[in-house]
Image (tube, grey):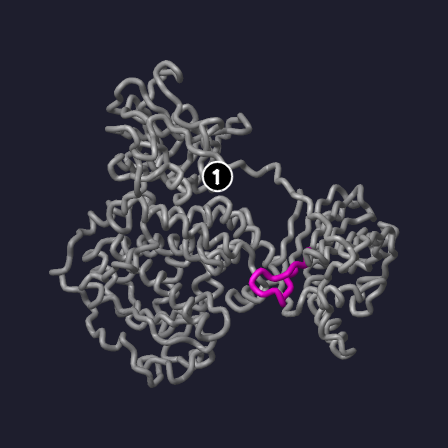
Amino acid sequence: MVQKYQSPTRIYKYPFELVITAYERRFPTCKLLPVFLGSDIISEYKSEDGAIHVVERRCRLNVDAPYILKKLAGVDHVVFVQKNSLDRRNRTLKIEAHNESFHSRITINEHCMYTVHTDNPEWTCFEQDATLEIHSFFGFESVVEKIAAKQYGANIKKGKEVMHAFVNELKEEGVTYVAPWRPTPSAAAPETPSIVDQDAEEPVAFELEGATGDDLATTSSDFGSMCMEEAASLERARSNPRLEAEYIERHLGHLSPLQESRLIQLRKWLTETHKGKIPKDAHILRFLKARDFHVEKSREMLVHSLAWRKLHGVDSLLDNFVSADVVRKYFHGAWHHHDLEGRPVYILCLGQMDVKGLIKSVGVEGIIKQIIAIEEEGIKKCEKATETTGHAVGSCTLIVDLEGLSMRHLWRPGVKTFGRILSLLEANYPETMGRLTLVRAPRVFPILWTVVSPFIDENTRKKFVVYSGHNFTGLSAYIDQKYIPDFLGGQCKSAITTLSNKTVPRTFYQYTTEEIELEQEKSSDNPSLLGRSAYQTAYVAKDFPQEVLVQVPQKNSVITWDFDVLKGDITFTIYRSREHLSAPRHEHHVPGAAGGIGSQQYIGKRMSVGVDLVTCCQPCICRDGDSIQGSHVATSPGSYVLQWTYFDSSHSFDPLSLNKSHVIYFVELFPSERVRGSMTSLQSSSSLSTLRTSRGPSHINV
């Protein structure tokens, strides 16, 4: 297995020429780098004008490895071959290195690049990545992998220190400026060869049947705003494609080189598969922490969470969310200043809360919506705290007052709701709670803890601190005395103290216990937190595709779609039926799906392409985790079918997965009178367009 390491972009606030002069002081030996024993030049090339300088060296490194491993290998040091290509004309230094020792057992490749900062020509950027593949190493493969990761991190940290040390050394010698390369007046300027990217696509024009520039003159406000939003989101991602080390330290906190590498890998994957519409870096980092920086596990967890947010409209929850009147009066919780580390503090008086009355008044979904709104508000408060405190604040502090807790809180639907809330928070808001303190725990607490603790993740349980009775002295260890609320032994007034109501009047009740238990039996995937969701969910099984019928009344109408692949791989295709379609011909039932229906089919088994169906775009294979948006201009009216088919690249049957994929999707039709403007402008302004050229296969943006 190939291990990949990628470091954030490091910024040296010195001109490129000064940095390179400092870098060259590393050779042939460097006392500041104990691991670097020395080097010998293998080959060297200099261009006549002095612009190009290529040096290849054989470098000896003293790797920090166990004695027994060195004894088995029969070496005291390892040899790497390093090639430095300096281009003074374009102000770049490219460094390539690979291992010469044990090359048949281990393959190590490292790439580094010094370039001029795009926004400030007086600064220099440094980027570094490496790959490691261990074929075999005397049974010590895992040890070697750990040594390589440790050495990589140590070299990055030491490299920065050495660079600054050499720059300061130059300054002490009076060298504060190194002139950029300039061609000599007598020498003719060399002709810069033109570089042709063989993989680049040539500009193409749309060739659509029945579509002309007159048919589409301008864009409608609805479709145009959607296109502009997509384009703006993609542009933002392209404008900052790499993470800088200073940004990580300032906004995300201290990370080890390996953790930085994992963050960059996951962020890059999201940028490629989600078209730049990716969550903020702090949000990505939380999922990496929740999965111990295992990229694949973090990716899977994050992709499902992003789909959950899209399915339930969570991103826009705070825009129009208003707590129910009964919640404002009887939900005893509020934000309360911050702790000594800058974390926002939320205080919840659970013991005084009538959980049963609240759930019977607003239902399970109403309580869940309230908790999610609090979580979303907490994330925004963390972002604000990061800006105001000057350091990264990625989590909140929760104080739960258990005064008044009794066996009445063990109401079965309430315990079930608590478990569902915890599962939801752990799946979608990991690592948002930095500290959780339980105060005024009554004698009955151990019994209650036995009931609810199985719902709590082990890592979360480690963050719990419990104080019984009226012992509040521990709060002052992490909360300023002036911010400790008065009912917990402090002097600060809290909004919670004004909430004297404890029992919810029955006049607020909207649900019976039986109705609540029936609601809890529903699958958590089916109900929407904000009413009816615009997205639908489908389970695409082998031989049973999911099909959506779109009736197009007139030509030049635009079909748009947005879907996420949550599990497995699928093939996406669009067909136009030569006959009119209406009702689905078959429905495939899947346990756990909404109404038991996993997918539905409109295309009959005997219908064939070329006779009954016209393929509108070539099939596109979409992988697990992909987020797809696209559009198709209907050249003829009629029945169009969007089809998601299960794709199995291994062609094997997996009884555990039941050979099915999970997709959520949204499809919309824009009539031709609402879409005006040339197809070229539609393509350039919208990332939804899928058609590239009639001379080749259609493409769907991924």
Magenta includes 691? Answer: no
> SS at mark 1?
loop
Q: Camera-side residue: 499 or 648? A: 648
User: In this orientation, does residue 589 appear?
Assistant: no
The percent position of residue 270, horizontal first and vertical second, equals 49, 48
In the displayed image of the protein, which residue is found farthest to the front? 186
Residue 634 seen by the camera: yes
Q: Is residue 563 above or below residue 507?
A: above
Of 92 and 347, nearer the camera is: 92
Q: Is residue 115 left or right of residue 29?
A: left
Taking depth in this image into account, of 222 and 685 the one nearest to the observer is 685
- The residue under the point 22% across, 63% down is 327
Assess whether residue 116 is covered by the magenta stretch. Answer: yes
Q: Residue at x 43, y 26 (%)?
A: 542
Q: Position of residue 239 (x, y in %)?
A: 50, 55
Q: Which residues are magenta?
A: 113-126
Amino acid type at circle 1 is Asp
Q: Residues within 10 Å of mark 1 (few under 14, many from 20)?
A: some
| Residue that carries the numbered disc 1 in the rendered image | 624
The image shows residue 508 at horizontal and vertical percentages of: 14, 60
Outermost residue, left direction?
507
Task: Indicate the quadrant where residue 480 lies.
Answer: bottom left
Residue plotted at (15% across, 54% down): 510
- Which of these two is toward me, 610 or 91? 91
- Tell me where residue 507 appears, x and y as whole percent: 11, 60
